[in-house]
Amino acid sequence: AVPSGLPQFAVPAFDLVEVGNIAVAALAISLVAFADTSVLSRSYATRLGDRVDQDQELFALGAVNVAAGLFQGFPISSSSSRTPAAEAAGARTQLTGVTAALAIGIVLVFATGVLAPLPSATLAGIVMVAVIGLIDLAVLRRLFAINRADFGLAIAALLGVALVGVIAGIGIAVGLSAATLLWRAWHPHTAVLGRVDGLKGYHDRERHPEGRQIPGLVLFRFDAPLFFANADRFREAVLDAIEAAEPPIRRVVVAAEPMTDVDSTAEDMLSELIDQLNRVGIGLSFAELKGPVKDKVVRYGLEAQLAQPPFPRTMGEAVHTYLEEHHVPWSDWEDAD
């Protein structure tokens, strides 16, 4: 039988030892609740053509969990099983939740005995049906087809939860996701850009080998923020691009729009690289650099070391300035038009 009566208000006892014992589990529950709620709300918003305020949603999630703690309840999140069940039953508004709460209250006060004769296997069957609904093989097949790395992360999370437990499994999945993110930022895509007849802008010469390079000018793109983990990779990639270009090289322009940050370790690398290039008569500048990142570069004191102008607004402006400064003969397809 389920104990009858509504939950009573009570301020939980605060014990530092107990807090320490449950801290890891509480963090794991928080991560699950956050992921469950945000993913479910976004998926339903997409289906229904609605919008979700994630900040407001998290505020509500925190508020109801504080209330649950004061009434000795379970941690709360949205439900990937109850939500589809409610929708299938015709639910359309938040009144569904109010109705469910009233129904549960009535059962707790007047009808707790009706649950006593149910076999435990009934509860097991309900849980199994709900969990089976969470296993989405179609998503795994899609991940395998379009992104093997994300598929590997999904399988690692599944095996971690199945073999070592929910909390440790979630920890493994989060750790692997963070490591994957760092690896991708550590090994970003780099490109030497060229001018392709008939196409606006400047394009990766690996994808467009017909792209022409301007004599003496290397246009280089680095598709990541510049920080301690990839600073040396940036330097080596720039030097390799210079070595592969037809000499003499007078200028390197970095297409810096993808750069969202430059940290202090990268600043040290840039200072050394610029000095190294300046000693052999090669200037370096950053085109299309975002304002906040440019402010950082200026604060680092690198502006005076860069070629002039140090921050061209566009790649076209950088190329035009270089052509005028060095009197390089160059025929552009747009000029011909």
Image (cartoon, helix red, strand yellow):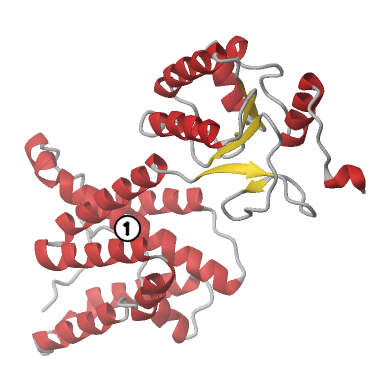
How many numbered markers are drawn?
A: 1
Taking 83 as reference, is 323 left or right?
A: right
- Please name whichever residue, 42 or 327, is drawn nearer the observer in this view of the structure: 327
Report x, y in % for residue 150. 36, 62
**As displayed, is residue 153 above or below residue 10?**
below
- Please name whichever residue, 40 or 69, is drawn nearer the observer in this view of the structure: 40
Taking 310 as reference, is 30 left or right?
A: left
Q: Amino acid at mark 1?
A: Ala
For this orientation, the residue located farthest to the right is: 337
Task: Choose top left, top right, bottom left or bottom right for residue 148.
Answer: bottom left
**As displayed, is residue 269 above or below residue 144?**
above
Confirm whether residue 117 shows in the render.
yes
Report x, y in % for residue 284. 60, 22
Report x, y in % for residue 98. 43, 70
Q: Which residue is mark 1?
A: 33
Quadrant where the N terminus sits is: bottom left
- Please name whichever residue, 92 or 99, is drawn nearer the observer in this view of the structure: 92
